[in-house]
Amino acid sequence: MPQWSLLIVTGILVGVVSGLIGIGGGILLVPILVILFHFSQQQAQGTSLAMMIPPVGIFAVMQYYKHGNVDLKVAAFLALGFAFGGYFGGKLANNLPANVIEKIFGIVLVVVGIKIFFKH
C-alpha cells in the first residue's frame, strides 16, 4: 500500500489540474497509479472512478456552478448515460487483459491530444 501522504499529494495535484482544465481522473490519475504505484490498469481505472464520486460532485462543480458554467439539465442526461455506460464499460474492462486496455487507453490519449493540438 502506498504512503498516505504521497496519495494525498497525488490527489491534490490531480485535483488542481482537474479543476483548472477539466481533466484529471482518466488522463492523469490512471497513468500515475499504474506507473508510480504499480496498480494494474483495471485497479487504476476503478480507483480513479471511486475517487471522483464525492469530491467532483461537491467541490469542483460548486465553483463552476457559482459562475454559471454548469448546465444541470445536460449534466443530468449525461450522468444517466454515464451510469449505464460506466457499468458496462467497467464490466468489459474487467474481462479484458490489462495490456489490451492499456493500448486502448494510450490510443485514446494520443488521438484526443492530436485533435486538441491541431484544433486551431
Image (tube, rainbow, N blue to C red):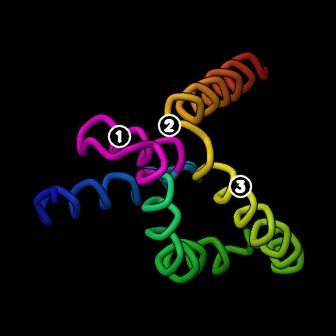
User: What type is the residue that disc 3 sits on?
Assistant: Gly
- Residue 9 position in % (x across, y down): 21, 57
State how far apart marks 3 and 2 are (Cα).
Answer: 14 Å
**Left or right: 80 with respect to 52?**
right
Asked where in the image residue 2 lies, by quadrant, the reply is: bottom left
The residue closer to the viewer here, 75 or 101, is 101
- Looking at the picture, does residue 5 appear above or below residue 60? above
User: CB under 8 Å between callouts 1 and 3?
Assistant: no
Horizontal and vertical percent position of residue 100: 59, 29
Label 3, residues with CA under 10 Å away: few <14, some 14-19, many ≥20: few
Q: Which residues are magenta?
A: 26-44
Q: Is residue 61 left or right of residue 36?
A: right
The residue that mark 1 highlights is 34
Give the mark, 3 or 2, whose residue is nearer the N terminus. 3
Q: Secondary structure at mark 1?
A: helix
Q: Badge 2 local density, few (<14 within 10 Å), some, or many (20+)? A: some
Q: Residue at x 41, y 60 (%)?
A: 15
In the picture, the quarter occupied by the C terminus is top right
Q: Quadrant of the N terminus?
A: bottom left
Amino acid type shown at disc 2:
Ala
Q: Is residue 40 above or below residue 100?
A: below
Residue bearing the label numbered 3: 89
Which amino acid type corresponds to the residue marked 1 in the rendered image?
Answer: Val
